[in-house]
């Protein structure tokens, strides 16, 4: 990846719209200042793209925008606050792990029902297998 990517190039690479990228900037979710070229257009570095790609994954995992914003604020502040960053990430990890456990429980139920219906249909049984 090269430096000085346009907002359109970044949006395409990370799967967000240009509008969403502008929103991320307005909400303070970027860990660095958005640079501008000589014509005033936003330009992003490889590091910006990596940060934004992480933000997309954080959002996909259910991390609130406020938490991403706080994490970005801490990163912008530089070293010395790593313990707070770690606490934010640990708390979110716990929420994701709990969500995964609930989803695994749901998947187990679905697998049981699928097996039941497959057995019912393979046997040519009548009636409702529920």
Image: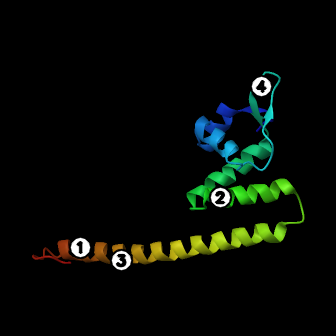
Q: Residues within 10 Å of mark 1 (few under 14, many from 20)?
A: some
The Cα–Cα distance between marks 3 and 1, rounded to whole angstroms, is 12 Å
Q: Secondary structure at mark 3?
A: helix
Residue drawn at x 62%, y 52% is 56
The residue at which mark 2 appears reads as: 66
Task: Using the image, tell me which numbered label, if any, was put on residue 40.
Answer: 4
Q: Quadrant of the C terminus?
A: bottom left
**Percent of width and height locating residue 33:** 80, 42
How crowded is the residue under tag 3: few (<14 C-alpha within 10 Å), some, or many (20+)?
A: few
> With respect to residue 86, does 73 lie above or below?
above
Badge 2, how many Cα within 10 Å: few under 14, some, many 20+?
Answer: few
Q: CA distance from mark 2 to mark 4?
A: 28 Å
Q: At x 73% / y 44%, what residue is drawn? A: 49
Is 129 or 123 nearer to us in this picture? 129
Left or right: where 16 falls relative to 33:
left
Q: Which label sits in the foreground, 2 or 3?
A: 2
For label 4, the SS is loop
- Res 77 → quadrant: bottom right
- Give residue 36's quadrant in the image: top right
Q: Earlier in the sequence, mark 1 or mark 2?
A: 2
* Distance between mark 1 and mark 2 Cα atoms: 44 Å
**Up-down relation of residue 4 to residue 130 (above or below):** above
Residue drawn where x is 67% and y is 49% of the image: 53
**Residue at the left extreme of this rendering:** 126
Q: Which residue is mark 1?
A: 117
Location of the N terminus by quadrant is top right
Q: Is residue 43 left or right of residue 112?
A: right
The residue identified by callout 3 is 109
- List x then y, in percent, for residue 106: 40, 74
């Amino acid at each position: 990846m090269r430096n000085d990517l346009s907002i359109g190039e970044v949006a395409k690479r990370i799967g967000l719209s240009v509008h969403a990228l502008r929103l991320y900037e307005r909400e303070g979710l970027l860990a660095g200042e958005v640079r501008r070229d000589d014509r005033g257009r936003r330009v992003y570095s490889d590091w910006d793209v990596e940060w934004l790609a992480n933000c997309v994954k954080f959002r996909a995992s259910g991390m609130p925008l406020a938490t991403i914003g706080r994490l970005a604020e801490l990163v912008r502040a530089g070293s010395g606050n790593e313990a707070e960053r770690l606490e934010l990430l640990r708390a979110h990890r716990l929420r994701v792990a709990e969500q995964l456990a609930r989803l695994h429980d749901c998947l187990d139920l679905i697998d049981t029902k699928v097996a039941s219906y497959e057995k019912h249909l393979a046997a040519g049984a009548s009636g409702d297998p529920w």
